Image: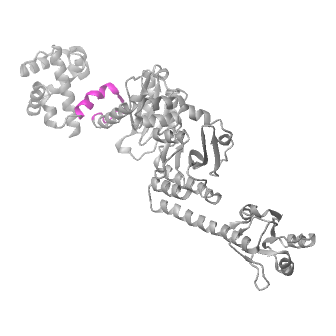
Amino acid sequence: MVTFSDLYSSLKSYQPTLILSNKDTNIEDFTYLTALKDIDNKYVYISDVSALENQIEKLIDTTLIVIIEEPLNTELIQILDNNSCNVITCEKVNSPIELFDTVRNIFNQEVDYLQQVKKLYDYVITQSSLQEVLTFAEELLGNPVLIIDESFKIIDYSKQIPIIDHIWKVNSEKGYCSYEFIKEVTKYKAIQEAPLSEEPFCVTCKQSNNNKIVSKIFIGKKLRGYIVVLECNRKVPKHQIKIIPEISKVIGHYLTHQLTSYLNLEEKLIIDLIEKKIDLKNELEERKKACGNAFSKDNYLLAIKAKESNISKKYNSKIQLQLAKLFPQSKQFIYKNYIVVLISFRDAIHFDTSNREQLTLALEKDELIGIISDHFKEIKSIGVIFDYLVSSLEIGEIIYKDKHYLESSEMKFFNLLRKMDSKEDLLSCCHPAIITIYEYDQKHHTDYYHTLFVYLLNNQNIHDAAESLYIHRNTMKNRLKKINKLVNIDLLKGEVSFQLFYSYKILTYIHCLN
């Protein structure tokens, strides 16, 4: 099917004139205008002036290409206009057969286009890979095809035809465009005046002689990237350029399922650091520049997730608004099942006890659990820090079932224990006195194990420990004497108290895992 306007634009070599255009109708086929045929308004009819005059009464709502051997008289034009006809006249025609072959070629190209579109969407139906789609596009267009996101990071590119354009060869090898490149390209008039659709547009630059055919990629109504066809192998014919918007739409479908939340430049950089996709220092510096160096040299990372009992819960806007109030200068986004906040130093110094309580209440209300990292300077370490926070949340949810906010410091020892292979290895690290006291309690129904733990927790202060246990000071003293008699250790020695306390941590960890 060819539109009337496309037909007209395809006949330029015949010096066409648009005599009448009553509507941009869709045309399914073509033929000569003869007396023996009934008129079908889904056809375009090729005719000379004399044949047109003979059939004028039958021509209602008809599309015509008229070969001009003599001028059309105004009376004839008026009749055709009254009958709602579309008329193109062609003056430079060597023979009717030549024009007929040209029109046939236009329709053949349209059939070919429809077949290619079908094949393109078959890739989606059969769940083929993005690279297969790019290979199809490369073979069809005869040139390398690249996908870049709106931050000019290379998402993927076709691999069969070598990229001989030096600039784009370097960009594809690095996986991103330099800050200087982005700064220069965004000044181009072709970029600034590009259509707000997938409609292709051409970009040329001083540094590269090769023309670039570019089409925007949208997800929903938001611009998420570009397809770049590098004309370094051959010029893409006009009828093939027509399929590029469809390629953009299909690639947009793939990216919907592959990219993470389609964030801004800063957030995308953090995501790539979390996923450890940036290996080179130069790339990190280039991308920090592209973000306007918007990162602090003093940072904290907050990770929040839904509790396992509520894992299917979606984050509502209230918790995100609360986080925005607590950390107004920080960067907040959703990554997989986590809310992630890169907290700036300015926000961190104002995060006092009151703010911590507000955060804890907000997390508790939505059945969430969160943890804030220790201070760090370089954002390149975000990946390792995020992994630590994820591990801490997993352990913390088991050990501190009723807690919704965890301190990073209290989880470090448990993360160390997680790296040990077996329960036997863990138990071998415990002070034997703790095992003895635990077994004695089980046999005699005493509470010396918990008493000693509270005593150590209160820095061996008898008065504070007694208050925590709601017992008299003398009762506390008597219990400690019995513990000392049972295991014969000096509880005031620093090394002993350290070994006892970490033994409690190990046994708590083992108990919770069981």
Q: Residue at x 82, y 77 (%)?
A: 59
- Magenta stretch, residue numbers: 399-418
Q: Is residue 344 above or below residue 75?
A: above
Most common SS among magenta residues:
helix
In which quadrant of the rendered view does residue 512 lie?
top left
Where's residue 258, x and y in %? 46, 48
In which quadrant of the rendered view does residue 384 lie?
top left
Asked if residue 510 can be seen in this view, the reply is yes
The furthest residue to the bottom: 36
For residue 249, side relative to residue 363 (left or right)? right
Q: Residue at x 82, y 80 (%)?
A: 58
Where's residue 419, x and y in %? 23, 34
Asked if the magenta segment contains residue 404, the reply would be yes
For residue 283, side relative to residue 419 (left or right)? right
Q: Is residue 75 above or below residue 514?
A: below
Q: Residue at x 52, y 61 (%)?
A: 121
The furthest residue to the front: 94
Q: Residue at x 52, y 50 (%)?
A: 144
Asked if the magenta segment contains residue 72, the reply would be no
Tell me the quadrant of the picture where the C terminus can be found.
top left
Where's residue 114, x and y in %? 59, 66
